[in-house]
Image (tube, rainbow, N blue to C red):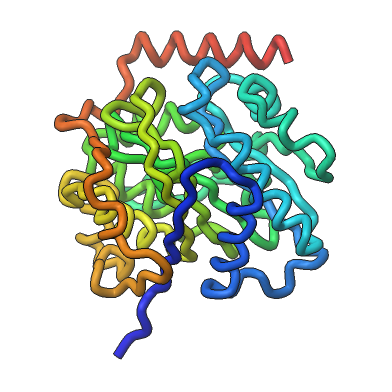
Amino acid sequence: MAEKIPIVVGQSRRYDIDRIKEFCDQAAVHLKFGERLHGAAVLLKPNLISSRASKLACSDARFVRGVAEWFTDQGARLAIGDSPSFGSAAQVMKKMGLAAELEGLEIKVVEFKTPKEHQLTHGVKVGIAEEALGCDLLVNLPRIKAHSQMYVTIAVKNLFGIVCGMRKAMCHMKNGLSHRKFGDLMLDLTTVLPSSVTLVDGIEVMSRRGPINGELLELGCLCAGNDPVAVDTLLLSLLELDSRKCPIWRAAAAREFSGARLEAIACLGLAPEDFRGSGFRAPSFLNPVPFNPFRFLRSSLRRAMAAASG
């Protein structure tokens, strides 16, 4: 009988750094990522979607601070990076208060700007940031949000940020002919990662609409796992959502990823039932994956102007 995939679930009603660090302790024991961290190169990969977005659209600075403190306590060499839709990682971190929150910690900000071409399914080629692949441990830090195109964005979708800059928009334009095909592309990103762990911020989440403009919902959930597909599967259940409406989950089930089967997951700590009746909502209808061409051109100009302004 195959060993079940461990997923750790906890609770925190507010962004208490000590509680977040306690959860990291708990997750490290069950997921065994706390071993050999002293001197290891650890990259934190938050959600820094855009400097133009609301704070709810990006990773919460207090959550990232708690995680960063925990890894610092273990003696890790820390870096933090992402490839935002608009602006640089440094610009988004400053706008969202994350740079100020991390003051006093030895942590290097890296920009995902060195693409290395990878061929994925359907003949798709994407430029994945070498900066994201050259670490000993990648710590995926998604925030639970509703998503207008992909139903929800959690662990797997947050990894889209390792695709460099405008190449993300090109993926939408060239390879987003169907939600299923785009779901496959998201799944392929999980196969090129270095050693990784996902720590999910479900304390204050974005409900109903997203990933930019949605409603605040106080869920009070923390979640961790080594398998991002299994993390998504468990949280879809916890949020009482229909997994079949999620293109990434459907693609994972069709490809028989073990993490897509709820019965293959061992839930440690709290259970999904402990969060029943949370009121989280995802979009009833999903928008097409490809961007409107005019929106794409406008976005390209904005990125060029942001890069020029430093």
The outermost residue toward the front is 13
Instruction: Establish if 187 lies above or below 81.
Output: below
| Residue at point 30%, 70% (across, down) | 258
Residue name at image x 38 percent, y 64 percent: 270
Residue at (65% x, 52% y) in the render = 18
297 relative position to 178: left or right: right
Where is residue 263 drawn, in percent x and y?
24, 73
Residue 151 or residue 269, whichever sits in front? 269
Residue 45, by quadrant, is: top right
The quadrant holding residue 80 is: top right
x, y percent for residue 188: 40, 54
Residue at 69% of width from left, 23% of height from top?
A: 94
Compared to 121, does 48 lie above or below? above
Instruction: Quarter of the image for the N terminus: give it.
Output: bottom left
Residue sitting nearer the eye, 297 or 201: 201
Classify 2 as above or below 19: below
Q: Please indicate, yes or no, whether residue 125 appears anywhere in the rendered image.
A: no
Measured from the top left, where is residue 28 in percent x and y? 59, 69
